[in-house]
Amino acid sequence: MPDAVKVGFVPFATAVRGALVVFCDEALKFGPAATKALGDAAATVKRAAATSKFKGKSASTLDILAPDGIKASRLIVIGTGKPSDLKETDLLKFGGVLAGKAGSSNEAVTVIAELASGAMTPEQAASVASGVLLRAYKFDRYKTKKKDADEASGNLAVSLAVSDVAAAKKAFAPGNHIVNGVVLARELVNEPPNVLFPAEFARRAGELRKLGVTVEVLDVKAMTKLGMGALLGVSQGSVRPGRMVVMRWNGGKKGEQPVAFIGKGVTFDTGGISIKPAGSMEDMKGDMGGAACVVGLMHALAGRKAKVNVVGAIGIVENMPDGNAQRPGDIVTSMSGQTIEIINTDAEGRLVLADVLWYVAKKFKPKFMVDLATLTGAIMVALGTEYAGMFSNNDELAERLSTVGQATGERVWRMPLGPEYDKQIDSQFADMKNTGTRNGGSITAAQFLQRFVDDTPWAHLDIAGTAMGAPKTEINQSWGSGYGVRLLDRLVADYYEAKK
């Protein structure tokens, strides 16, 4: 957690400390508090804007050192663009932009949380604060030598001047827990695989008990008793045994049906006997991005005391090619009783999810289930790294996910499902194969998963392009993005708000 980065709220009348950050629209118009704080320096801003061709476009910046006329060591102007185009996600971006600009210094930063039209709402100011924290996150615990800029950014202290301090703090409280959930997911994805193996991942998930989450860890013996042959087949080639972790947050009405989230947690994926090429194999430490998201989500929901009942379940394995590893041609029996012919041991994530999905569907009978997995390279061929692929057997759930994806900036794009694709995974020797042909690879993977959800409303998110190594953004400079935590937290919040 970025504990070294401090964000607080102060009244508009508070004296400026260190650098000053103000916002303007595309007409270079400031709000009244910012105009007052700038005083004679407003003329300097206009001259600097003309020289640097700064036009107040959204998330653009103008940086002036030691400006005349104000008691600030530095003045940073952030453009907000056309007022009518302002979106919720823009406020997060503004926070990220200011953290990126101010993060190289070791001084205090005062932000006048005001748009050209007047003071930001408490929710808008809270979004800016969240953007600061999301951008400031760094994963550098294994560096023994740090650059001066890295040391300075770790001491960033940001004060947001607002019209109502109490209201801003109240609005920020839940968002702060969501940020912590995102950061937790990033931490898990970024950890090296010799540190974060299945048992250690399960132990870290167990720390959610401190927040009131009920956590149950199933070992190999327990999963064998349940008949989880699909998951266990993946883990049998590793000296580090697999785990399944079931987390429950009971914040809703007693006995009310929960909603459920399931994550693929392959802490390292060599491909098994169907071994991957050596190039970039080190990235396969991130093949547990789905499970990381579920743990981060449970942290966020419990932290903000969400009034919902939620189940989070993750299957955690390491896919290795030793003498005991499963082979192409093997047939395994899943917990559902359905048999699976192994064609490619590198199509392992769907095997892990198959047993966890079935377990959750039958034991908890959730209102809906969403699974997340860094499942296929094919989804990146289709969608690149801007959208996660979404597959669903329920139009209402799919529409909700699309809507909250646009609202949070963690976007999803619905992909097709259909019985025609089942032909690719029908097996001559078992009930199904674990992979089809190259064509439609992400779709046949989803068709496979659909066989283990029964009639439960379900969505599958293929996050191979968004959970790790995705392009850096204003609010994320980390290799592990924490994708999905904000998306699914909003899904839960909006779903229960609509049901009131």
Image (tube, grey):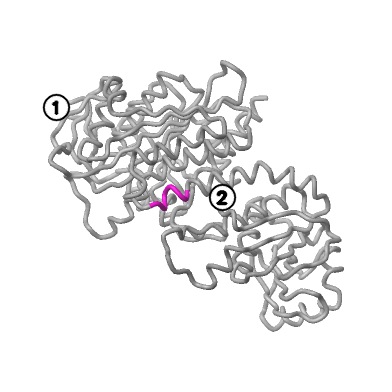
**Residue 346 x, y percent position in the rendering:** 24, 44
Q: Amino acid at mark 2?
A: Gly
Of the pair 263 and 103, the residue shown nearer to us: 103
Q: Name the quadrant containing residue 175.
A: top right
Determine crowd level at label 2: few under 14, some 14-19, many 20+ residues with C-alpha closer than 10 A. Answer: some
Name the side, left or right, on which 99 lies relative to 24.
left
**Residue 291 x, y percent position in the rendering:** 42, 40
Give the overall secondary structure of the magenta segment. helix
Q: Earlier in the sequence, mark 1 or mark 2?
A: 2
Of the pair 260 and 407, the residue shown nearer to us: 260
Q: Which mark is residue 429?
A: 1
Position of 322 relative to 78 (above/below): above
* Element on which disc 2 rests: loop
Q: Name the quadrant containing residue 220.
A: top left
Name the side, left or right, on which 390 lies relative to 183.
left
- The residue at which mark 2 appears reads as 409
Residue at the far front: name it: 144
Res 66 visible: yes
Q: Amino acid at mark 1?
A: Phe
**Residue 141 x, y percent position in the rendering:** 45, 58
* Element on which disc 1 rests: loop
Q: Which residues are magenta?
A: 186-191
Residue at the far top: name it: 255
